Image (cartoon, helix red, strand yellow):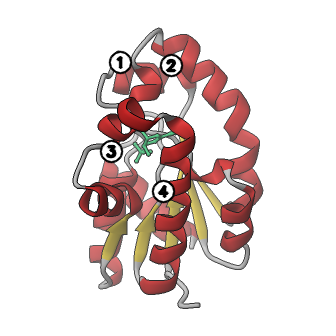
Amino acid sequence: MTRPQVVLVGPMGVGKSTVGQLLAARLGVGYRDTDDDIVAEQGRTIAEIFVDEGEPVFRAIEKAAVRRALTEHDGVLALGGGSILDEDTRALLAGQRVVYLSMDVEEAVQRTGLNAARPLLAVNPRKQWRELMEARRHLYEGIATAVVATDGRTPEEVTQAALDAL
Ligand code: S3P
């Protein structure tokens, strides 16, 4: 399996795409995002997949997309925020350089708000965020080789902190 130089994980809205592209430019490598892969492959948005088929089907599509991207891509790879819920996916990440971009719940609520494009935040985002963070924080921490806090930082500052942590 090819090894992406850096895999970015973390919650929705933490800035994986923005930081991932900045990081790829600084490292002189390509950038890839599994959410973009899924939308391109499926010809519909993530929200449409959730509405049409529900979360379990989305997670199966996502699992395959992550596996494929890990095999094919040799640069910076950003994963969808929930991809780490899958045990096999977490096992695939062992031995990779995995940067966890973290933020606290209030920052998450401020950044994302009520968000129809993000089906998990379509109702009561503060409660949803608390539950998501509670359920996932230890999974992110368990696979990360570096943790970079993003609260109150610009994308450029986060990118520099990620480079320093690599
Ligand atoms: C999700 C995160 C989203 C997207 C979907 C579900 C999650 O990706 O895959 O809305 O479960 O956290 P981003 O983290 O790229 O926004």
Residue 153: percent from the left, percent from the top?
39, 41
Marks 2/1 in contact by CB < 8 Å: the verdict is no
Q: Pick whichever, 99 or 152, lies toward us.
A: 99
Q: CA distance from mark 3 to mark 1?
A: 19 Å
Residue marked by disc 1:
113
| Residues packed near mark 1 inside 10 Å, few (<14), some (14 to 19) or many (20 plus) | some
Marks 2/4 in contact by CB < 8 Å: the verdict is no
| Residues packed near mark 2 inside 10 Å, few (<14), some (14 to 19) or many (20 plus) | few
Q: Amino acid at mark 1?
A: Gly
Label 1 SS: loop
Q: Residue at x 53, y 90 (%)?
A: 2
Say whether disc 2 or disc 1 marks the residue closer to the N-terminus.
2
Does the image show residue 81?
no
Mark 3 CB within 8 Å of ligand 1? no
Does the image show residue 63?
yes
As drawn, the label of residue 61 is 4
As drawn, the label of residue 106 is 2
Label 2 SS: helix
Relative placement, left or right, of 87 versus 59 is right
Q: CA distance from mark 2 to mark 4?
A: 30 Å
Marks 3/4 in contact by CB < 8 Å: the verdict is no
Label 3 SS: loop
Q: Pick whichever, 14 or 78, lies toward us.
A: 78
Q: Amino acid at mark 2?
A: Glu
Residue 42: percent from the left, percent from the top?
30, 56
